[in-house]
Image: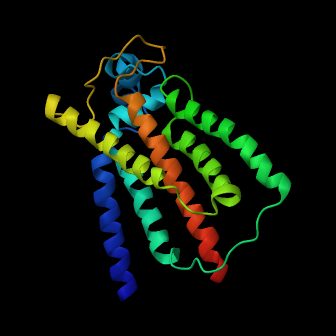
């Protein structure tokens, strides 16, 4: 009996979920006319980003992107709460090649990561992609240089990045009544200084994601010593 009831409840929930979206016409000309063609025709004028994917992620669905960054922050905090107190064992120092190779490559990797999120409104890339490169570099530096001790400056950078993202969204809400609306000049299309608030938002996302991902790696690496 319980299986029949469970099946019935699931069927009702699925039906209630499908009915509202049935009229959207995913994969049909109707859907393309309503959404895709609007983005293609109006995206550059609305948000100023030559990369339409960036425009959708940061402008049209920017509130959802803020939620994704928040989820990553909560994941990092959760891992830290579970593993941060298990730092009793010291890892052996890396070899000569690893240490000096990391020292040599780190500046170039950081510049490359920064390029990806600063240039994300023009070419494929963005805050999460550039942040992943930054996180890899920081994890490498934790291993060979900093001994998994997070510099205090990273705390302030991460905090400031989060406030920049949220602050720009709230400013748009105050100025024009829409969260993350464009409150900065769009600039000339296809130029680096264009797309209004998208550039500072992607810089904030790239830095915040990079620091938080590297923290997760740090917690697992050191916490795993006594797992």
Give the side of residue 149 with respect to residue 74, left or right. right
Count of numbered circles in the view: 0
- Closest to the observer: 193 or 41? 193
Residue depicted at x 28% and y 59% = 16
Residue 196: horizontal and vertical position, in percent? 35, 23
**Residue 41 occupies quadrant:** top left
Judge by depth and name the residue closer to the eye, 201 or 152.
Answer: 152
Q: Residue furthest bottom?
A: 1
Q: As rendered, which of 45 and 8 lies closer to the eye?
A: 45
Where, quadrant-wise, is the N terminus in this rendering? bottom left
Residue 81 as seen in the image, left or right of residue 218:
left
| Above-or-below relation of 148 to 121 | below
Residue occupying image coordinates x 74% and y 48%: 102
Q: Quadrant of the C terminus?
A: bottom right
**Vertical relation: 80 (above or below) 105:** below
The percent position of residue 35, horizontal first and vertical second, equals: 36, 30
Q: Is residue 125 visible?
A: no
Q: Identify the coloring.
A: rainbow
Q: Position of residue 226 (x, y in %)?
A: 64, 83
Q: Which residue appears at 35% of the width and 51% of the height?
A: 67
Q: Is residue 141 visible?
A: yes
**Quadrant in the rendering for residue 183:** top left
As drawn, is 226 to the left or to the right of 177?
Answer: right
Compared to residue 2, the image places residue 138 above or below, namely above
User: In the orientation shown, which residue stands out farthest toward the top?
Assistant: 188
**Quick one: 32 or 170, which is closer to the camera?**
170
């Amino acid at each position: 009996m319980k299986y029949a009831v469970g099946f019935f409840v699931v069927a009702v929930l699925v039906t209630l979920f499908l009915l509202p979206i049935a009229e959207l016409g995913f994969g049909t000309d109707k859907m393309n006319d309503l959404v895709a063609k609007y983005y293609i025709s109006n995206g550059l004028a609305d948000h100023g980003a030559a990369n339409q994917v960036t425009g959708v992620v940061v402008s049209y669905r920017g509130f959802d992107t803020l939620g994704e960054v928040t989820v990553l922050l909560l994941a990092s905090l959760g891992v830290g709460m579970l593993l941060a107190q298990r730092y009793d064992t010291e890892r052996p120092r890396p070899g000569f090649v690893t240490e000096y190779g990391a020292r040599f490559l780190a500046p170039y990797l950081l510049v490359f990561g920064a390029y990806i999120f600063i240039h994300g409104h023009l070419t494929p890339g963005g805050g999460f992609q550039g942040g992943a490169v930054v996180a890899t570099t920081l994890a490498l530096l934790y291993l060979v240089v900093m001994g998994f001790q997070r510099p205090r400056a990273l705390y302030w950078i991460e905090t400031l990045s989060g406030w920049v993202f949220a602050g720009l969204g709230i400013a748009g809400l105050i100025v024009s009544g829409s969260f993350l609306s464009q409150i900065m000049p769009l600039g000339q299309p296809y130029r680096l200084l264009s797309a209004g608030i998208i550039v500072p938002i992607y810089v904030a996302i790239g830095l915040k994601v990079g620091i938080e991902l590297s923290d997760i790696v740090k917690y697992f690496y050191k916490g795993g010593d006594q797992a």
